[in-house]
Structures are given as structure tokens and as C-alpha cells.
Image: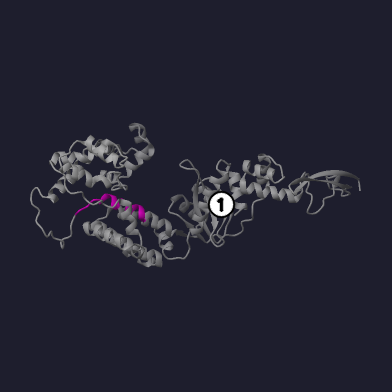
Amino acid sequence: MHSRYDRTLADAAVAGRRVEIRLRVRRFFCDGQGCGVRTFAEQVTGLTARYARRTVLLRGMLESIGLALAGRAGARLATALGLPATRNTLLRLIRALPDPQIGTVTVLGVDDFALRRGHVYGTVLVDIDTRRPIDLLADREADTFAAWLGEHPGTEVVCRDRAGAYAQGARTGAPEAIQVADRWHLWHNLAEHVEKTAAAHHGCRCQRDDIAPEVPIESGSAVDLAEAAALAQVQRRENSALVARTKARYEAVHALKADGKGIKTIMRELGLAKETVRRFYRATSVEDLLAKPRAGRPSLLDSYKPYLHERWNAGITKASTLYREIAEQGYRGSQGTVALYLAPFRELGAAPPPQPAVPKVRQITSWMLRHPEDLDTDKQLQLKQVLASCSHLDATATHVSTFAEILTGRHGDRLDSWMAAVDAADLPHLHRFVTGLRRDYQAVRNGLTLPHSSGSVEGNVNRIKMIKRQMYGRANFDLLRKRILLAA
């Protein structure tokens, strides 16, 4: 024994009061010839650690508070519990925690998450068998993912979304692994193309051959007036400044595209945002850009239209007068909206009977994507009316139903016949969906056949979003990584 010395250790509070332990320990000589340590101090198991000014218990409590609440909020709670510590102390304790051991992961799930939405993204890796996150990567590049797979061999299955970076990274880092496209992402991608199809055919009134009008339409009849009013509104939209600008931009972008120029070059020459140029660059026709998924959305004026029609036919045709009347009844829109709605009546000389509201695009899309048993009788009837009015939407609904059977029953052997049926139909948006499936065919086929799924990965992505919103929103990546891995 060399000597003794006194140590002062902060400990967990008792009854809300701070506790300090004063401990006398021994110092010893080291007689080892090759040892560079001349003396060393005695440690008390479960109480002390080298160079520590806190007990093991107190350090563990502060680490738990820091992991749960991060710096500022954690410091406030610790002080209230009689364990005063600064925010920097808590963050330093979190950074000092060792990473958990990863081991061999047989079935790996991968997906991206936003560190700063639209600017900075990271990657979360999940053990599908245990449903726990095993690592976070600071970006979503293929090389980073491939390097991680190379450092952690043994992965046999990679569950991923449709992102090309993860597909390339898996092929490079684990070429023997089976890639499985997630079924939720497949359904979500299909839903996007179905919505575009519904937008392109919204308001379609092409009748089937077996539906014939029972009463002939006479000139000047109510039906004739309604059709004329609808036609006038369509012409007014087609002649709007927005439509003209969209057509001009489409022609300009595709003229430069025909000259072999890329998106960045077109962006600089036209002075447009990158996302705008990309949208126009990839569109196959201007109709794709003019089809709005939100078309047919409810208007503040809907409930007042019958009153406006009645008053107009009664001789009250001044827009400002009608606006004041419905404003007194609770209308909160603008006078310009009323005047725009009444403009076709002025050209026709009469107001047709108010037409029933057309379901908006997202309603139609939702009805087609849901199981018929999940729709009530009224919605089923509305969907039948929509499908009966447009053969394209009717064909789309049939293809969606068939794909849902393939996806839920994992009948991957029927995928080829389904894609052939879609190719034979006049549905350009679904053709693009099928083209995407062919680019990632093997992973899609595996996703529709094998039982593996990325559901737990999506759950962890949502958990990361929640943690960022609650306490780690401005934290550095290393702190967020510690929080996710150590408090899973």
C-alpha cells in the first residue's frame, strides 16, 4: 500500500435532497516490471469508477434522463429531482455510452428518414427478426450502405423500398443476398398512379353503349342549359392564364430536351426551380400536368348554389347583390368566386338546375383502393356511378382489384400476366407503374411471394420522427443515433 486519499462522490438524492458521499480509499504500488503505472487507486464495486465524481447509480440515472429528454429538458428534470446537471453534461454522458453489439443480421430492413426534410436524409437499418434498429447512417448513398454491408457480413435478405440507391448498395455490398421490395411501397406507388389516372379522367361523361337516354333532349331544356353551362366553365378554365403558362413552359422545356439538354441546364436557361423543371421534363404530355389530383374538391359555394340558381331565374342577376344575400346566410368566400360562378349564366341567359357535386379525385381513388366490404352502401353506389361513366376508370378499378389479390395473397406467379393485361389497356399512368416494376422486377417478384416485409422499418422511421419532434429536433446526428440505438 502506498497511501490513502479522500474522494467526494455525488450520489442519488434522498427525499429530494442532494447526497454527497465522502469516501477514503487506498492507493497501491504496482510491482510489475513492464507496467507504466506506478500507483493505482482502489475502486469500490458498484459505487466508484476511475476519475468519476459521481457514483455508478447517479451516472446511470443521468444517462437515462439524457437519453429520454436530451439536453435542456433533461437538465430541468434532473434539477427538479435533486440531481443537478447541465445540458452539456448530459450530452457528454450520452456520447460516452458504448454502441450496442450488432452481430450477424440475417434479414435486414433499410429505409431513409429526414434529418432536415428536403435537404438532409439519413438511413435506418433494422433487424427484421427482432424489429429493433441496429444502426443509423448519416446519408442514403449507395456506397455508404454497401460499405456497411461489407463490414457486417452474413445478411441473406434485404427488405427495402423502391429507391435505386439501396438496390445498388445491396448488389455491391451483399451480392448473394435476396432483395425484397416492400409491399406497402408497391401499393403506395400504385395508389399514386391510380390518383393520376382519376385526375386525368375526372368529370369524364363517356356513357357505355348499353346506357341510352330515355327522354330526348330538346333545345333550351334544363339538361341542355346544364351542359352548356358546364361547357362554358371548361372553356373558361382552358383559356385561363394558368393553363396558358403551363402549356408554354411545357413546350419550352421539351424543346430544350429535344436539343439534348439536361434538367440543370434547362433550369439555368429558363430560370425555373429544379423540381418544376423535373416535373415538366418527365411529363409525356401537357395533359399530365393539367390533371389536378385535387380537382372536384368541395367549395364554400356548394351549399349556396341552389339559392343562387333560384334567385337568378327570379331576375336577380347582379353578382354583388347575390353575394350580400348569401353572405348574410353565412357564406365566407369572396365576391369574385360568386361572380365567376355566375358568368356562364349571363352568357346563356338562364340558370340551369344545380348539378350534384362530382366526387373529388382523392375520394374516387380511395374508393377504388379500398376493399368493397369496407365501403358503405352510399359510397358503393357512388363508385358504381363513377365507373359506369368512364371506361378508363372502370378498367383501372379492375386492375387495382386484381393487383390487391396478388399482393395480399402473395401470388407473385401472377405478376407477369397482370402486367401484360395492363400493357394491353389504354392507361398511360398504369403503364408507367408497370415500367417501374420491370426495372426492379426480381425484388418486386420476391416481395409479392416471400413473407418478409418492411413494416417494422416503417415503424422505426415513424419513431425517429416522433423523437425528433419531441426532444432531439436540433441534435447532431451522433446524439440522435445514440438515442435510437440505446433506447430502442
What secondary structure characterizes most of the magenta part? helix
Residue 290 appears in the picture as rendered: yes
Label 1 Cα neighbours within 10 Å, binned few <14 / some 14-19 / many ≥20: some
* Residue 257 percent location from the top left of the image: 30, 39
Along the line of sight, the residue nearer the viewer: 316 or 159: 316
Count of residue discs = 1
Along the line of sight, the residue nearer the viewer: 40 or 65: 65
Compared with 236, 433 (above or below) is below
Q: Which residues are magenta?
A: 190-205
Is 326 left, or right, of 214 in this rendering?
Answer: right
Q: Quadrant of residue 194?
A: bottom left
Compared with 412, 255 (above or below) is above
* Residue 26 percent location from the top left of the image: 88, 48
Along the line of sight, the residue nearer the viewer: 456 or 338: 338
Residue 233 magenta-highlighted: no
> At 79% from the left edge and 49% from the top edge, which residue is drawn?
48
> At 35% from the left edge and 52% from the top edge, which residue is drawn?
192
